[in-house]
Image: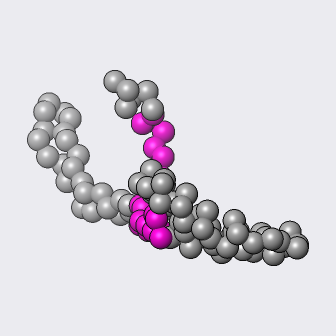
Amino acid sequence: MNDINIFPLKSTHYISNHCFAECQLSLPGPNIQVKEVSYWKFKQIDMDNFRSDTASSVLCNSRWTSLEELAQCYDTILLQIFDKHAPVNTKILTVRLRVPWFSFKLTKT
């Protein structure tokens, strides 16, 4: 409540022994927060080229002696293949506060 500023109060338009009270309020807006989201567009991958690159990679053509080596190679090679076929996109989103009077039911009507 300390953030609300009330500017001069005026009495206007008298009707009988009643009148309108007018003033201007300065209300603080919500803090706008943004967040950065990164994602791949998997639906745009040409699956034939993806399968071909995966099959010809070190991942499928080597013998592994340890699980740690395989996991490290899996992470590295698969990320390289994904970056080739579906580069990472980054988007800045505005985080909006939920307001109690607006619900999913309203969007359906």
Image quadrant occupied by the C terminus: top left
**Bounds of the magenta span?**
84-103
Vertically, is 33 above or below 10?
below
Taking the image as shown, residue 85 lies to the left or right of residue 19, namely: right
Q: Quadrant of residue 77?
A: bottom right
The one nearer the camera, 48 or 1, is: 48
**Residue at screen point 42% across, 36% down:** 102
Residue 22 visible in image: yes
Q: Position of residue 103 (x, y in %)?
A: 45, 34
Farthest right residue in view: 66
Q: Is residue 22 above or below residue 71?
A: above
Queried whether the magenta region covers residue 53, the answer comes back as: no
10 sits left or right of 70 in the view: left
Give the number of marks. 0
Quarter of the image for residue 73 reads bottom right
Front position in the image: 29 or 91: 91
Q: Residue at x 21, y 50 (%)?
A: 22
Judged left or right of residue 73, residue 57 is left
Query: Furthest-top residue in view?
Result: 109
> In the depicted view, which residue is nearer to us: 91 or 76?
76
Position of residue 70 measured from the top left corner of the image (x, y, whole percent): 79, 70
Residue 20 screen position, x and y as percent: 19, 41
At x 50%, y 70%, the residue is 83
Q: Position of residue 98 (x, y in %)?
A: 48, 46
Q: Is residue 34 visible?
A: no
Residue at (27% x, 62% y) in the render? 7
